[in-house]
Structure formats: C-alpha cells, structure tokens
Amino acid sequence: MLCLPDIIRDDDPSVQRLLRAVDHAPALTALIRAAWQVARVLAGHMVEAVLAERARRPPAWPACAACGTPLQRKGFAARQVTSVLGPLRWRRRVGRCPRGCPREQVVPLDAALGVAPHQRSSTDLQHLGCALAVFVPFATAATLLGLTCGVTVSPRAVGEWAQAAGQRARAPLHTQLQAVADGDLPTTEPLAAEVAALPLALEADGVMVPLRPAGGDPRGQTAWREVKVGVLARLGRHRTRAGQVGARLYHRRVVAVLGGIEALPQRLALAARRQGLQDVPPVVWLSDGARGLWRLLEESFQDSATGILDFYHGAPHLWKAAAAWLDGRTHQARQGFSRARHRLRHGQPDAVLAALAAALAGEGLPETARDTLTTV
Ligand SMILES: [Zn+2]
C-alpha cells in the first residue's frame, strides 16, 4: 500500500523538492515547517484544480448593462490573487458587449467566486491582515503574514485593507443609528436565560490613543487623540475551584468611537438596546466623575439605569479629603483615608459621606480645607 508522501509524489512531481526537504529535516521544528510548506502548496493546487474545472463549464452570460444585448465570450484570460495559500492562478472566460459598449469585460466565474475586478489579494488574506492590524502596526502585520502564509504583502496594503474594512463596517452602523434615531428599536441579541436574568452594567470612559500624524505613514510625531469607549456586560458571580466567589462579566460588548463625548451617546444607546436595556433587571451605569459622562447618563439612561461612581476613580478623592482635613497630621490622614477607602470598597458610600459631612461640621476648619471637602 502506498503511504501519503508516495501518493503525493506520484501525483504531482512539482512538490518533490518540498517533500525532499521534509525527508531531510533534522529537527522537529524544521520538519513541521517543511511539512507546512507541502500542505500549503498542495492546498493551493487543490483550489486551482477546482477553479480550472469550474472555468471549463460554460457560464450563463448576462446581458450588457448599457444596451441589453447578450454579451459575447472573448476567450480565456489569466487571473491571479495572493491568498493565505500563496499565489493562486486560474484562467477563465471573459465576455464583452458585441456592440462595443465601453464597459469593462464581464467575468461570470469571478463574480460567482466573489472576486472583485482588480482584486489582487484574497478576502481571507485581507481578513487575517485586518485582524492582526487590530493589535500590531501595519508593518508588523505584513511581516507576520509573510511568516505564516509565505506571501509578500506591503504594510501599505494592510493599511488599505483595514481602511476598506472600516468603511464597509461604517455603512450598516449608520443605517442602524438612523433607525434608532427614527424610533425603530434594533433586534435584541439572543441570550441564554440565566445570562439574560443578570443585571446589565454600562460603563464609559475616554482613553488617549496614539495615532500616526499622516494616514498610512509611520513617520513624524505621534498624534494622541481621544477615543470614547463604552462597555456593556452582564454582572454575574463565579465560583473558583477553591470555592471562592467573585464577580465576573458575561456577554461583554464594546463600543468605541474616535472623538469627543458627543459621538458616544447614540452608539451606546444602540448597543444598550441590543442588549435588551428596555426589559432587563437592574441596569448599572458605572463611570468616573467626568461631567460629560454623567450628562450622558442623565440624557440617555436616566429612566433605566442607576449611576455609580466607580471605586477606582472615587478613592483618590478620599485621599484629597483626608489630606486637607487632617493637614499636617500625616499618620491620622493615612488612617482616615484607609478607613474611608475600605468602606467605599465594601459598599458603604453613605458612611463615607457621613464622615465627610462630620469633618465639614467640625470647628476651626481652614477655608481651603472646607472647599476641598465640599468638592469631594
Ligand atoms: Zn452593450
């Protein structure tokens, strides 16, 4: 019985060189790399064989878009795209209008395959490049594509794919935002019943993001711009193997937009409606103290959500209060701060507020300390 390498050897002599590399690979790493090369080349041949077979079938020629005359075949023409399997080549029938209408040639097979005219890289390769570009610069993404797929891709190409993907994603988002503005509620995302019963938490903040000064060009000084981010999640409980119970976020969804606070509310409202804001149990709005974000809560979620200042943004203000109140008495200030922070962490904000009020009512408080305590 023939084993797999023999079948391949028999069938396709062009992979013999690659098979020899597999045979002679000394270490496991080299062996895997060499075998991976064979797998890619074979997969490429398989795809090309299917394309060649499909290209032989006579296509249904459409009518000329300009004059309506049935198109006429003009013979076969070569086509190539770069894919995750390397370059793929096929020949397929092209047609033109017999009346010579000035229009590009029509290629039914490419249209059926979802390959656009002038498209030089396959959509799967573009998807991979875009996914990498979420985490690493375009040049690194291009290098990683070369390492994994053995193809040469320029950083500029990865940048253009990401731009195009962004444009494609933008169109349906604008349609959905318009629909919400017109009062059409979006479809709620389906959820398992036990997750749907959990409270919904909304959170929003701004982060500074380093961008290139000129699109597509890494040279020049980094331009820092703000991205407003909203996070939506169900608040659940999780028991560790040691039996400890902790909070855990389920079904997390993220909304992000480049620009100021004015760009966020519509997008966050759309995402919240998709998460069933209108018919879920308690909704929590968690945020830092920024006025713009609390205005967003008041204007968009007042009826459905309870606002909570998050612990990590609240705690530093307690230190300001303790330092002002117990000015010069460092040890007491530290103790007071620790106590207040502990209470805040364990869900006793009223006790913290009462301590602040008591400090304000105390006698002999300097005016600056009074101002600080009032602000806090
Ligand atoms: Zn025509």
Image: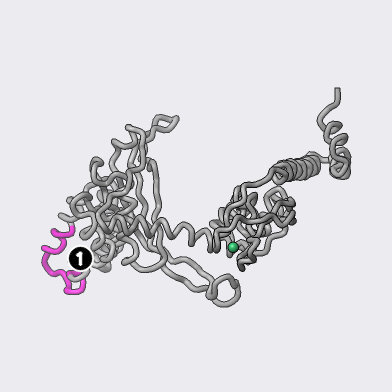
| Image quadrant in which you'd find residue 334 | bottom left
Amino acid at circle 1? Leu
Q: How is the image coloured?
A: one colour
- Ligand 1 closer than 8 Å to the CB at disc 1? no
Which residue is at the front of the view, 44 or 308? 44
Which residue is at the front of the view, 182 or 70? 70
At x 39% / y 48%, what residue is drawn? 253
Ligand 1: quadrant of the figure: bottom right
- The kind of secondary structure the magenta stretch mainly shows is helix
Q: Secondary structure beneath disc 1?
A: helix
Residue 366 lies in the magenta-colored region: yes
At x 43% / y 59%, what residue is drawn? 171
Quadrant containing the N terminus is top right
Span highlighted in magenta in the image: 356-370
- The residue to which callout 1 is attached is 373
In-image side of 350 versus 65 (left or right):
left
The outermost residue toward the top is 1
Residue 209 lies in the magenta-colored region: no
Quadrant containing the C terminus is bottom left
Residue 54, x across and y down, in percent: 69, 43
The outermost residue toward the bottom is 220
In-image side of 308 versus 78 (left or right):
left
Residue 193, x across and y down, in percent: 32, 32
| Image quadrant in which you'd find residue 357 | bottom left
At x 17% / y 74%, what residue is drawn? 367
Which residue is at the front of the view, 59 or 371? 59
The reply to whether residue 371 is in sight is yes
